[in-house]
Image (cartoon, rainbow, N blue to C red):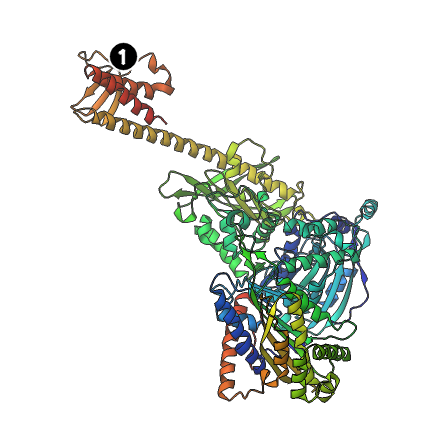
Amino acid sequence: MPHEFGKWWDCLKKHTKRSQHWLVRAQQLHDALDGRRPFRYFTLCARTMIDVFMLAREGILSHDASYGNLSEVVFCESDQEDYPEIIEMLGVEGSGFPNRLEPVVLFQDDDYTAQFPTVGSIQLELEDQDLADDQRDALQLKRQHLEFAAKFPFDFLNLDFCGYYYPEPPDILEINRTVDQMVALQSRDTRDEEGKRISVDEFIMAVTCKFNNEVPTEAFNRLERIVEENGNRFEEYSAALLASRGTREPEQWKNADRFDFFLGAWPKELLRISQTHGWTMSFTDYLHYARVNDEGQPYNILCLICHLTRQEQTNTYLAEAIKVLQPENRQFIDEVDKQSVAGLALQADLAEIVAIRNERARVVGRPELQLP
Amino acid sequence: MPKLDDWKPIKLTAKVFGHLSQGLYRTPAGAIKELISNAFDADATTVKIHTGFPRFESFSCEDNGVGISRTEFKRLMERGVGSSFKRIDEAQITPIHHRRVIGRLGIGILSLAQVCTQFDLISHHEESEEAFTASIRFPPYTRQEIDRLKMTPEDEIIKGGEYRIDSLSFDLEKKGVRIYTKYLRESFRKRMGELSRYLKQKYLKSKRPYDSFGEFTNLLFDSKSPTQALILASDYDQLLFGLALAPPNRYFDSEFNVLLKLEFFQEYEQKLTDNNFTVYFDNLHLKRPLKLPSDRLATTAGQCGISQPANKSFELQDGQHKEQVAVRKYEVSVADSDIKFSAYKLQYSNPKVGGRPLAFWGYLFQQTGRLYPKDIQGVLVRVRDVAIGAYDTTLMNYPYGEGPRYHMVSSELMIEEGFEDALNIDRDSFNNLDPHYLRMQAYLHSLLHSTVFPETWTEEKTRNKARKTGAKVQRDKSFLRTITEHSKGKFRHIKTVETLDGRTAGPIKFSDHDQTILINVKHPVLLPLLKRRKYQELVQQISIAFEKALREKGEKQREEFYTLLAKVFDNQP
C-alpha cells in the first residue's frame, strides 16, 4: 500500500467517515442479521486496520478476548511486508489474499486456462514441471481468483481504493470492472463450517476513491456519454439537471464544475452495475472531503455508501441518479477543529480504537500506532 | 521497492547442489527449521512464520535478529555455499544473548529451495546500519543436470540459482531478516493443502486454522482416541509438530509433562526460557509438544507422583571399550493405580571417543503401555538443543526383541560436546558410522538391555502377580457373600487344608464357628480334579456350591446348586 495512503489513518475527517457512516451502516445491517450468523466483512484495510478494530469493538465482527481470531474478515494486500502483519493482527491464517484486488477479481480465462475449471484440475496441471512461466502464472492467478470467489458473499464490501476510480489509460475501467465483478459475486451462495447455506439478501458497499485534476479525460468523456444518455432517456433527469445546473448539456456542466460533474455522474456507474446484476441500490451516504498531498497539491476524497437489496422488481436508477445530483444529498466533511466538542469526541473515539488495535499489536509483537 | 541489479549466479559446491536438487531435507520441517536456526544464531527473540494455511499461496519468515550484512550475504552467494563444511566453532557464542551457534547461514537460506522456486530476502543489519533487499531464484532441476553432477567432483564450485540485490534505507525498527515468497513449489502446496487428515477436521469437522497451539496438542494427544502416529494426520500437522519439536523452545504446559516436576528437568526448562526465543507458526506459539505420560488410560502428569532418585549403574559396551556408567532412576507412581512408570536421568562424558571429547545428558521415560502418538516413541537427539531429525523409533537400531516395551520408551539426548562430524550435511540425520554416534548408540543399547527393560520386566511381573492375587481375593469375597446370603451363618474365609476331622465325609467343611469354609485338597474326590492349576479355583468353588446345596433337601437342593453355580461362573475372570 503506498505511503501516501497509509499515513492518513489518523485524519479526523477520515475518522468521521468511519465512525459516523461506515459504522452506522454496518451496525444497522448487523442488527438486521439478529445473530443468525456472523457478520462477513471484506476490506482493503492496510496495516493500520482502524476499520476492522472499530467494527470489532462494537461487536459487529466476532473476535476472541485479545481481539484476535477475527474469522469473518477477508482482505487483499499486495505489500509482502504488510501482508503477514495483517494476518497476525486478525489472528487467522489464510484470511487474506497476497495480491492486488483488481487482478484477482478480474481474472479471465484464455483458451489454455479454460481447460482447467476447478482448483483441483489447476493443481494437477501445475504439478507439470515443464510448464512455461506464463502458463504457470495464469493458472496460479486463476486458482487465486476461484479461491477468492469462494469467499463470497459478504455483508459489507469496504472498497477503500487508495487511488482514482478511473486509473490512467489504457485501462481506465479496471476498478469499475472490479466493482462490477464483486457485485456479481455477491449473488453467490457459500456454506459455513457446518454446511449451512449462506447467502445475502442485502449488503453494504462503500467505495472510496480520489479526485483531482488528474482524473483522465477518457473518464470524463465516458461520464459525459452516460449523463447524455440518461438525459435522452429520462426527461425527469434532464429537467432536474436543467433546474439545478442551468443546462441540459453534460459538457457545459462538466466545464462549469468538473468536481460537481464527477460527483453527480460517477454514482451512475454503481447504479448500472447493481441493476445489471439484479440488485436494487440506494445511496445511503455520499461523502467528500479535501486533502493536500506531500507536494502541496490539493485533491478530494469521495466515498459513496450504498445499500443493495435483492428486490429485482424495484427500479431505483432514476430516483437515485437524481438524488446524487442534488448537493444537499452529499455531505462535505469539513476540517475538524480538534478543540471543538466534535473534534475531541472524534479523537477520543479514535484513541479508543487505536488502544484496542495496539493492545492486539502488543500481543502479536507488531509495531503500535502512535497517535499524534 | 527499488530497482534491483541484474541477476547474478549463486555459486555452490556440486555436493550442495546435488543435495538441494534431490531434496536435501526429508521433510519440509527440516528445511524450514534451518531458517529458525539462523534466526536463533542472529540473536533474534522472535521468529514468525506464515504458510498461508489453508491455501498455501504465500510463505514468510521474519525474525528480529541482528540481520545479515550485505557483504556477508554476497560472500555467501559468490564464494560457494557449502565450500567449507567446517564444524561450527564449538566456542562460537552469539554476542547479545550468548547463545551457542546452531545453524549454518548459507545452507539455511538455500534450504528454502525445497519449499519455493524464488523468494525475496530483506535484511536490516544492525551492526553496519545497512539494509538490502535480494531476490533469489532456483533453477528447475532437470534430470540431465542431476545426472551431470554425478561426474562433478563434490568440492567443485558450480552455479546453482541466481540472485540480485539492491540497497534499502536502514530502519532499526525493522532489524532482522525477512523472507517472503509467493513462488511455492506445487509439491509443497499439494502436500500441505491435502487436509482430509487434518486433526481439526478429523475431530472437530473444521478446516479452519488451529485457534491455539494448545488446541493442536490437545487434539494430537486426545486420550479418547489418540492419534496412533502423525503419518495418519495431515502433512500440515506433521510440519507443525516437526517445527514445534525442533527449536530451542520451552516444553508445552507442565500439566502435560511429568518430567517438568523433576528438578534437573526444571533447570533445563529454565535454560530454554533464558534463551528468550519464541517461534510463531501460522499465529501459533510453538512449544515442544511432548506429553508424558501419554497412554490410552488418559493418565495425566497431575496424577503422577515421583519418588526420590535411586542411583544405578550399568556397563556400557562399545566394541572392545567397556566402562561403568551411572544413571539416576525415579519411580513415577500414578494416583489410585498400581501402574508405575520410570524416569532416568542420563549423563555421559568421555574426553576421548574417536580421539575427540563427547558429552551428553538426557532423560529416558519408560511408560507402562504404548506411547501415543508413535512419533514420541524412541529417542530424539539434540545438538545445541536443536532436534536432529525426528524421534528414532528404532532406538538407534536396538537389536534385541523386547516385544511391546519398545513402544513404551521416550527419550531425548542432548549433546553438550562433540557430535558435529556425526551430522550429515542436512543437519537432519546422522552418519551412522561416526565414533560419537556409535558410542551414543552403545550407551543407549547397554542402558536399555541391562537396566531399563529388565527392570520393566520385573516390575511388570510383580504387578501382574499382585493383580492376579488381588483379583482372586475379590472373587473369593464376592463368592463368600453369595454363600452367606444362602446360609444361616456368615462366611469370611476360604481355606485349603490337607485333612478334615473324621466326622466330615465330604471334601468341604462349613465352619460356622470361625466363619471359614475349609477345603480338603487331599480328599480323593477332589484330588484328581485339582491336578490342573488352571482350574483349581473353579473346582473349589463348584465343590463348595455342590456341598452347600447338599445341605438342602428335595427340590431346593437343585435350585441352590444352580444358583450358586451361576455365581461361580459370573465370578470367573
Who is closer to the viewer here, A247 or B99?
A247
Which residue is the site of mark 1? Answer: B523
* Residue neighbourhood size for the residue with mark 1, other residues' Cα within 10 Å, grouped as few (<14), some (14–19), many (≥20): some
Quadrant (top left, top right, bottom left, bottom right) of the C terminus of chain B: top left
For this orientation, the residue located farthest to the front is: A235
Who is closer to the viewer here, B290 or A112?
A112
Residue located 47% across and 51% down the image:
B264
Image coordinates of residue B226 in percent, x first then y, are 50, 43
Image coordinates of residue A49 in percent, x first then y, are 58, 71
Quadrant (top left, top right, bottom left, bottom right) of the N terminus of chain B: bottom right
Q: Is residue A196 above or below residue A301?
A: above
For this orientation, the residue located farthest to the top is: B524
Q: Is residue B503 above or below residue A257?
A: above
Q: What is the number of callouts on the image?
A: 1
> For this view, does B444 lie left or right of residue B519?
right
Residue located 52% across and 32% down the image:
B403
- Location of residue B551 (image quadrant): top left
Residue B400 appears in the picture as rendered: yes
Image coordinates of residue A128 in percent, x first then y, are 76, 49
Q: Is residue A185 above or below residue A129?
A: below
Residue B286 appears in the picture as rendered: no
Q: Is residue B114 above or below residue A173?
A: above
> Is label 1 in a helix, a strand or a loop?
loop
Who is closer to the viewer here, A245 or A353?
A245
Who is closer to the viewer here, B344 or A337?
A337
Chain at tag 1: B
Image coordinates of residue B189 in percent, x first then y, are 67, 52
Name the residue type under label 1: His
